[in-house]
Image: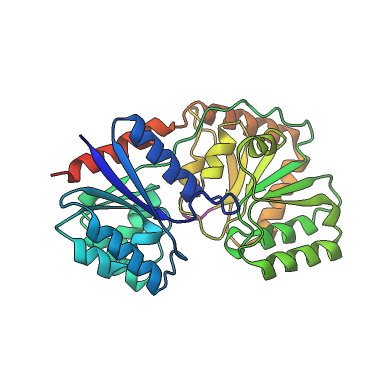
Amino acid sequence: MRAVHVVLPGDIDDPATPSGGNAYDRRVCAGLAAAGWTVREHGVPGDWPHPDGAARARLAGLLAALPDGVPVLYDGLVASTVPELLAAQAGRLRQVVLVHMPLGDDAEARALPLADALVTTSGWTRELLLARHRIDPARVTVATPGVDPADVAPGTAAGTMLLCVAAVTPVKGHDVLLDALTGLVDRPWTLDCVGALDRDPAFVAGLRRRAGRDGTAGRVRWHGPVTGPALDAAYAGADLLVLPSRAETYGMVVVEALARGIPVLGSTVGGVPEALGRAGDGAAPGVLVPPGDPVALAGALRRWLHSADLRDRLRHAARGRRADLPGWPATVTIVSQVLDGVRT
């Protein structure tokens, strides 16, 4: 029997805090079970990746109770913060860390080399970890997120329906997007922002105040966290996904948009270029601009709104890229192979 213990943040299923990392964990757990693994999930309460003493103690007790030699798949937000606990179990448990979001701190530098294997969600993340830490490259495997097939979004002729799917925080660049749109009030457009509004309340309040001053308030709609059919509906009504992130390890929303034939306007950061990719004919299904550059972002948006030819070309490329996107079974197969590799 193949069994794996999966250690997750305790709030992974909180509908108020959806994230790409949580979605990835959920799909991998379900996929491993479907592939014949006995999956035992352990949600550990705590403010990960900033655990207090109580959270550390809960995790230490959990790990100590596991039988010798079993594979343990950790979410990186947990494992990367507790090097002392990974060290205590090194050699007894077969420890695999799934790194969604590198933290880049001393705890991570001490924790990750202790793992028997690492799984990253993008090639960019793998290269970053190898550059930062003393890790054997043979122990780091890339398993990019899959995506579910979806109907093509019909789009509108004028391309005026803009969508941003991201928690509203400084790292996701909503302030840069509002700066860019302030210079486009002469053009018709509507922006729907889908994502948690409680991660940085002061930042969100500042954005709302600014929208009220610069004439964009009625054209920017804040929906909060949305999942399931409501998120599908948001994509179905969109012409262009805009993701002006300052940092992004992959960008699952990029492939979610492409799965619906929606072009993407994003930043040249992290794994976003990897997620965007190219259609089979080599055409780019979107446009990337430097992060934190509202002038460049405004220019790209203006060209999108002005040029029907550009919209047609990007939509054609997005639909071409749609055909080549990997599904979740491919992701699960890679993770399963890594777990098989550490089993005794």
Residue 270: where, in percent of width, then height?
A: 46, 54
Residue 133 in sight: no
- Front residue (pair 160, 279): 160
Decide if residue 144 is on the left or right side of residue 276. Answer: left
Residue 123: where, in percent of width, then height?
A: 37, 48
Quarter in which the C terminus is drawn: top left
- Front residue (pair 138, 94): 94
Instruction: Find out whether residue 185 is within the magenta segment.
Output: no
Q: Residue at x 25, y 63 (%)?
A: 86
Residue 272 in sight: yes
Residue 281: where, in percent of width, then height?
A: 50, 27
| Position of 60 relative to 25 (above/below) | below
Quadrant in the picture for residue 159: top right
In the image, the segment drawn in magenta is 268-272
| Position of 302 relative to 105 (above/below) | above
Residue 322: where, in percent of width, then height?
A: 53, 29
Quadrant in the picture for residue 144: top left
| Position of 287 relative to 107 (above/below) | above
Decide if residue 121 is on the left or right side of residue 154. Answer: left
